[in-house]
Image (cartoon, coloured by chain):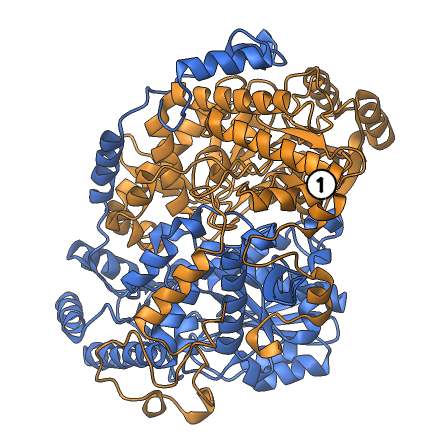
Chain colours: A orange, B blue
Amino acid sequence: MKTIFAKSVPGRCAWEIESDAPGAADMLPAGLLRKAPPRLPECSELDVVRHFTGLSRLNYSVDANFYPLGSCTMKYNPKFTEYVAALPGFSRLHPMLAQLSRGAACTQGALQCLHETERWLCELTGMKAFTFQPMAGANGEFTGVKLIAAYHKARGRTRKKMLIPDAAHGTNPASAALAGFETVNIESRDGMVDPEALMAALAAHGEDVAGLMMTCPNTLGLMEVHLPRIVEELRKVDALLYYDGANMNAIMGKMRVGDVGFDVVHLNVHKTLGTPHGGGGPGAGPVGVGERLLPFLPAPRVAMREDGSYRLEYNLPQSIGYMGPFYGSFGVVVKALAYMLRLGGEGLTRASEYAALNANYLKKRLEDVLDVPFARRFCAHEFVASAPEGMRALDIAKALLDRGFHAPTIYFPLIVKECLMAEPTETESKETLDAYVDALREIVAQGKADPQSLTDAPVSLPVRRMDETAAARQMVLTEDMA
Amino acid sequence: MPYIPHTPDDLQEMLSVVGVRTLDDLFADIPPDMRPQSFNLPKGQGEAAVCAYFEDLAAKNSPDMISFLGAGYYAHQIPRAVDALAGRSEFYTAYTPYQAECSQGTLQAIFEFQTAVSRLMDMDCANASVYDGGTALFEAAMMAVRATRRRVLVVDEAVNPVWRVMLGTYISSLDLELKTVRQRDGVSDLAGLVAAVDDSCAAVLVQNPNFFGAVADYTELFAAARAHKAFGVISVYPVMQAVLRTPGEMGADVAVAEAQSLGQPLSFGGPYLGVMACRKEHIRQFPGRIAGRTTDLDGKTGYVLTLQAREQHIRRAKATSNICSNQALCALRALIHMSLLGPTGLTRVAENNMALARYAVERLTALKGVELLNDAPFGNEVALRLPIPAEPLVDMLTSHGCVPGYPVGRYYPGMENVLLLACTELNSRRQIGFLAETVGGLL
């Protein structure tokens, strides 16, 4: 499709405000002005509407396709939460209003939203408090490891090592590095953190270990059976335990991370709590802490006065500072609260139960189609499988696209060869899962009979396989770099 | 069961395929002593009840007061078409475009966004966006730190304090030093900044217009930075950028912005949109997602995420950033907003806002004891010195349904009498008249 710039016609303008203002040259010295207007598209409103409607139709999405992308929790996003977040009482509210003493009175509803969401998340996770400042999951990880650093610093020690299992998301080591930690890789055995590897790392680095970042259930979709021992060993050296909330949709109502020994957790509300993924964002990554990390939370925090009104607390002497400009992705957090209120505690538990049912059902039905490791264990909300011998995960993924399904996550985690990691979520019906199984069965049969035909896929989408090498080499990143 | 389609028959059949009796059997790996010690959450409610709950909460806020509050975040008109198009669920219920063939809509939109940002900034290229203006500033600083292998960041005190405190927090665990050059009466100290840049400096960070609304030309500063092989980084206000001298013309290495003003509602602090543009030679230091144009097997033009060797899922601890997403939907909104306004619309908005700010200055400085804080050129935002502390005045006016601006003393001790006032097309001459009369009555 032509770009919006290619559709531009000089002199068209969709949207011009009524104004009798003089030109900029009459208001500012010439040396401070740009030489020519920015070359933005010049289009009619209909041009713009047609263009973006056209673009939207080139996408797969949860609303149009089964989207079993592992570790991403592509569940259905209830429509009413969009209405709620767009209420003018929220959407038109300037964040700095809340900082002014009279202004805070004008933002009570918004502050109450944050306070109420914090109460829900605390009960859901068993943590003591939450900050909403982190603007996405990775930003939440960064916040979490900074809290761990602050904890050790307050005890007058510098600890440099962060332990990270090899199955972890790549953001874990990247976030730890950004907070000044050196990462130590902990190998898996039988799909679990290997207690021996953990003991060896603790023996080697002893009291230089600041903490361990865990995803639980892990990215293989398995519960960590050694969790109690891991907690115990870390406690011995006063190292803290971080819970990566990417897989939280697996455990709601079944396990609370605060109860089992985690000190800090980030949640991806765009995964677990039903807010849309937006084509890659915006998300929100609230971070919860137990008692030990409470004093270090970012500023400000929402506090309730004795009369039941809300205020912002900035006086937090041990706080790590400001991870975001204000109070987080408020417009996303509102949707998460709406989702929780709609489902209630029972509904949240049910979401995890049916997520596990759908994943286990799919895993079972695919055992004679793909190579499914850990077949004798239940999976959590997702599971991994390898492409059958001689076939590539990439080809299977592309063939799925031709059949109207989004592909699972492929080549992750890195420790599974030709990995396809599927997370069906609770909102998909048995019919959809069965159709997906049939499609995979057909693809594998086709791949065995005619291997070439799979490498041609997809053939029914707006484009076929893209030349990624040329993209990286030629670096055409804008219309003007062509 | 809301959003769960399983009938009782489905449930029984699926449980039997899996080989368990109850749903809870699937959680056998969580032993009884690891089950929740408490789970006291209320029962779910119907959709109408939840909506009513939020309607009540929203009604407790007062978003519709007359407001001259800006300070980096501005209430602009957003064409309804932005909501309608970005509200298409093919966009908002998709995820990161890992599978390019079924994500061409998102990918092309990112490519077009990168083009629009580059042209607005007059820079070679842009990335797919980061969380907000503060993270954009931090990520730009880190690009410079990596490229120069230096550890000193020189920052103008007139850069938005919200982003400066974030920068301080973000770098606090790294071995970096922040050297802040004081502003004078809201004017950036260009000579002081030039003097602070030396061979140990990774980057100099400035903002145009600065936090106090003052517009300047940073060409000489960036030339001085280049002479010391340091980066020149500038944060801009996208709406004013329609008329102001561009980062490219000034010779900046990286240009960033909080682009909330391009089609994002204020929404009590987020989600917002951090944009980043840079010169071509710095591309490989870019954080986050970047879309590129290429061809498919048949030679047909299409788009992919590219230069991924920089990113965390490949480089892990050695990645350029831990950011693994972008504000895709916010970037889409900004792109649609810019496409609707075009060069003419955006320029007229900037001019209208500037003209209103001049009218506000005329009316307010006519009051006894109110004067401009400095004589620097300004855009649509301006700092005024009052004869009394600004914060109580703001409080009093807020009670009258009018927020006159931001009391700067909250961030700048010693500047308690300074009020920062912004005008946009949502303000009118009539509102400004009301403001001047009310302030006049209180002085």
Q: Residues within 10 Å of mark 1 (few under 14, many from 20)?
A: many
Give B282 or A16, whichever is nearer the viewer: A16
Give A386 or A300, whichever is nearer the viewer: A386
| Numbered-mark total | 1
Q: Quadrant of the N terminus of chain B?
A: top left
Q: Tell me the amino acid under the disc marked 1.
A: Ala
- Please state if B337 lies on the left or on the right of A103 as rendered: right
Q: Is residue B213 visible?
A: no
Task: Tell me which residue sits at (28%, 46%) in the image.
Answer: A107
Element at badge 1? helix
Task: Tell me which residue sits at (27%, 77%) in the image.
Answer: A16
Q: Is residue B351 above or below residue A228?
A: below
In the rendered image, which residue does mark 1 sit on? A393
Task: Tell me which residue sits at (40%, 13%) in the image.
Answer: B8
Give B414 or A388, whichever is nearer the viewer: A388
Task: Give the quadrant of residue B154.
Answer: bottom right
- Please state if B171 lies on the left or on the right of A291 as rendered: right
